[in-house]
Amino acid sequence: MHDVKTKLRRALHRVGVDIIPYDGRRFVARRRIDVIRAADISIVVDVGAGGGQFVRWLRGEGYAGPIVSFEPVSDAFSKLQRRTTNDPSLTCMKLALAERAGEAVVNVAGNLWSSSLLPMTSQHKSAAPASVYVGHERVRLARLDSLAVVGPEDRAYLKIDVQGGEGAVLDGAAGVFDRIMAVELELSLVELYDGQELMPALHKRMSSLGFALVWLGESVFRDPASDEILAVDGIFVRRTQGRGV
């Protein structure tokens, strides 16, 4: 039987196809759900929700619990908000989460999902021309720990996809960080936005807070010309009581 499987896989490889088990070692959607179940997560906080793709993935994998999604860009928020029609456990908030309350100007990208509060670097523009900024929008800022989102008894899964502003979101979650059991981050290996924290700094920060990196995904952003990996997704799980952000 082993020889048959080996021959079959080799034949499939020759035409660019493979068959692998659907498990958390390889697939972020499965790993995410495994973490949510193992950590007994009671709420998912979706920061940088875009048009709701993360919500769609979660629901598709069977998570039916509460989700609070944050998205500041009007066009993306409109798409996200439409998902609440048939999803009573989804709450949408038109806010950018950061380390402070107030207002700021977000740079709106042509592809929407690359929109950021930070200036985009030339390397990013070169690797993804469709992501260049096409406009600007004034948005409201808030700290996560200033909002009545994560309750005293909650065990939260915090997903952050904010195009270079990960550190600011973590800073603004300081007051509720003891209730966060897992964090999913986009980790940049090179500077894609001016002044952003890169993967080594974010890994060091999460480790100091008592979190272990349990999943490092396939590249989510590559330079098409050089094939250089520019950013990957990572999932961190609480292992000890952290010292605070």
Image (cartoon, helix red, strand yellow):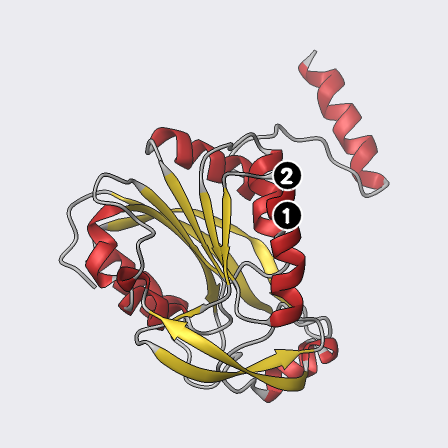
Judge left or right: residue 83 versus residue 204: right
- Tell which of 163 and 202 is nearer to you: 163
Judge left or right: residue 129 versus residue 93: right
Labels 1 & 2 near each other (Cβ < 8 A): yes
- Structural crowding at the residue carrying mark 2, measured as other residues with C-alpha within 10 Å and reported as few (<14), some (14–19) or many (≥20): few
Q: CA distance from mark 1 to mark 2?
A: 6 Å
Q: Position of residue 96 (x, y in %)?
A: 45, 70
Choose top left, top right, bottom left or bottom right for residue 132.
bottom right
Is residue 88 something that shows in the picture? yes
Q: Residue at x 64, y 47 (%)?
A: 83
Q: Quadrant of the N terminus?
A: top right
Q: Position of residue 26 (x, y in %)?
A: 56, 40
Q: Position of residue 114 (x, y in %)?
A: 61, 72
Q: Secondary structure at mark 2?
A: helix
Q: Residue at x 56, y 29 (%)?
A: 62
- Tell which of 4 and 210 is nearer to you: 210
Which residue does the numbered mark 1 point to in the structure image? 83
Is residue 27 something that shows in the picture? no
The residue lying furthest to the top in this view is 1
Judge left or right: residue 74 versus residue 183: right
- Structural crowding at the residue carrying mark 1, measured as other residues with C-alpha within 10 Å and reported as few (<14), some (14–19) or many (≥20): some
Label 1 amino acid? Arg
Q: Secondary structure at mark 1?
A: helix
The residue lying furthest to the right in this view is 15
Question: Which numbered marker is on residue 86?
Answer: 2
* 54 up-or-down from 208: above or below: above
Q: Residue at x 51, y 33 (%)?
A: 63
Choose top left, top right, bottom left or bottom right for residue 157.
top left
